[in-house]
Amino acid sequence: MDALTALHHRVSCALLTEPGPSQAQLETMLKAAARAPDHANLRPWRFLLVEGHARQQMGELMAKAVLADKPETEPAALDKVRRKPLRAPTIVIAVAQMKEHPKVPEIEQIISVGAAANNLIIAAFALGVGAYWRTGSAAYHPVVKEGLGLSDNEIIIGFIYLGTPQVKRKPAPEVCIQDIIEPWGENDIAS
Ligand SMILES: Cc1cc2nc3c(=O)[nH]c(=O)nc-3n(C[C@H](O)[C@H](O)[C@H](O)COP(=O)(O)O)c2cc1C
């Protein structure tokens, strides 16, 4: 698939099943992620790969986070939380690793990692791999962050669920370009 086709037609895929992406597909996606624009080449990202039993461990962490905030949570509700990471065979956690830099504020580093995550899901689409970028309260919870081994200077940009689409992917909605762009300033270009 050529780049513009992937960029114009990418859609998320919530219903994912086995198999997850192959090693070669993961490498292709991560290579795309690592080509995101990056002020001062700080490479402010790292990616955690969660597969197999590690998904159960991640589910336990998510449940622990919910319990920390709401100890009275019903067991059924907790089980639902535990099962969240089982929605796909593979999860890539995009982590922003903020560095001190005189010219590159944190926001630019976060944007870079967002761009990296976006590159990753576009590459997944081009490869026929289903992808869904999720966050939710777990992404910002200290219990989850600590359990995943994140440092104080790190934040989760997204849990990217990856796998084989269970259903035919929906077409991308039409975009009305006139809705998203407007002229600004004195346009002295002769028409
Ligand atoms: C930073 C970020 C976090 C997101 N978190 C969630 C989420 O937790 N749950 C969810 O259903 N969608 C979430 N989304 C949106 C989906 O990934 C997806 O983009 C949206 O459902 C629109 O579908 P589309 O990508 O096919 O247009 C998130 C998107 C971004 C960029």
Image (spheres, helix red, strand yellow):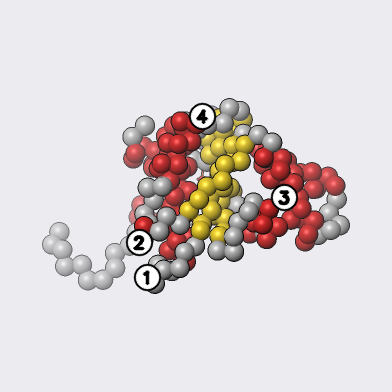
User: Where residue 61 is drawn, which disc sits there?
Assistant: 3
Chain-order first, disc 3 or disc 2: 2
Give the residue number, with chain letter if any, for mark 2: 40
Q: As displayed, is residue 174 above or below residue 166?
A: below
* 1 left or right of 141 in image: left
Say which element carries label 1: loop
Give the residue number, with chain letter if any, for mark 4: 22
Q: Residue furthest top?
A: 19
Q: As displayed, is residue 141 above or below residue 35?
A: below
Residue 70, image x, y percentages: 81, 59
Q: Are the residues tagged 1 and 4 within 8 Å (C-beta)?
A: no
Chain-order first, disc 1 or disc 4: 4
Residue drawn at the location 36% of the way across and 37% of the way down: 5
Residue 181, image x, y percentages: 34, 59
Give the residue number, with chain letter if any, for mark 1: 103
What is the spatial separation of the Cα atoms under label 4 and label 3, in whole angstroms?
26 Å
Report the label total.
Answer: 4
Give the amino acid type for the residue marked by disc 1 in the picture: Lys
